[in-house]
Amino acid sequence: MDIDVDVPATFNPTKIFPGAVRASRVQDGRLLPHPCGIYFQEVPIDPLTKLAAPPYDVAEDLGCFKIDFLHVPVYDKFKSKDEIRALLEVAPDWSLLQIPSVVAKLFQVSKHHEILAKVKPTSVMQLADCLAIIRPGKRHLLDRYLGNPRQVRQELYQKVDGDVYGFKKAHALAYALVIVLQLHLAKENLL
């Protein structure tokens, strides 16, 4: 199981959860901090680094459960959850997705203007579909999607055995909502 929690860039989970242990990874034979993973259960701790002794991929095999706190800097632009919720109730200016200079600043789709230009999303679901299509394992579905989005949508989010390039629908929708927030900021020249 994989749990990701999107948080502002300033969020430090170890300050809020003092008993949490930072996950680790091995690079060049050295134990280094995992970019965003935290354990809330007992896990062996390396006495020198104070990180989880087993790297995250080994720890998972040992039954450890990691939660990733993903820093999403766009959240830093807002004062409260209520402000974010209110903006998500308002449709953004979808035409901004047709402007390459705006798309270049957007989360996850910054290098995929050509797909947005073809799909021309006008809803969160269509934008989520674009996020799924940009994955290498699903890109081949673009032309079929343009012909019949509803029919292809199910296939977009279907996990194929061994498919490491698919995208969960829940992730695609969550990322699409982040982009909606960015579109609101772009409209106000705050992006």
Image (cartoon, rainbow, N blue to C red):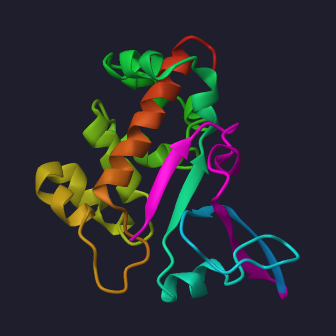
Give me the residue at 72% from left, 81% from top. Answer: 53
Give me the residue at 38% from left, 21% from top. Answer: 85
Front one among 117 and 59:
59
Front one among 71 and 65:
65
Q: How many marks?
A: 0
Instruction: Pick the quarter of the image with the C terminus.
Output: top right
The answer to whether residue 6 is magenta is yes
Give me the residue at 31% from left, 50% from top. Answer: 129
Whether residue 109 is visible here, answered yes or no, is: no
Quadrant for residue 36, please give it: bottom right
Give me the residue at 70% from left, 45% from top. Answer: 15
| Relative horizontal placement of residue 132, taking residue 13 as reference (left or right) | left
Instruction: Pick the quarter of the image with the N terminus.
Output: bottom left
Whether residue 30 is visible here, answered yes or no, is: yes
The answer to whether residue 72 is magenta is no
Question: Which x, y percent locates residue 97?
Answer: 45, 31
Does residue 153 lie above or below 179 as drawn? below
Does residue 31 lie above or below 6 as drawn? below
| Relative horizontal placement of residue 180, taking residue 41 as reference (left or right) | left
* Residue at the outermost left position: 151
Q: What is the span of residues highlighted in magenta in the rendered image? A: 1-29
Question: Which x, y percent locates residue 162?
Answer: 37, 86
Question: Which x, y percent locates residue 106?
Answer: 56, 37
Front one among 42 and 126:
42
Does residue 21 lie above or below 30 as drawn? above
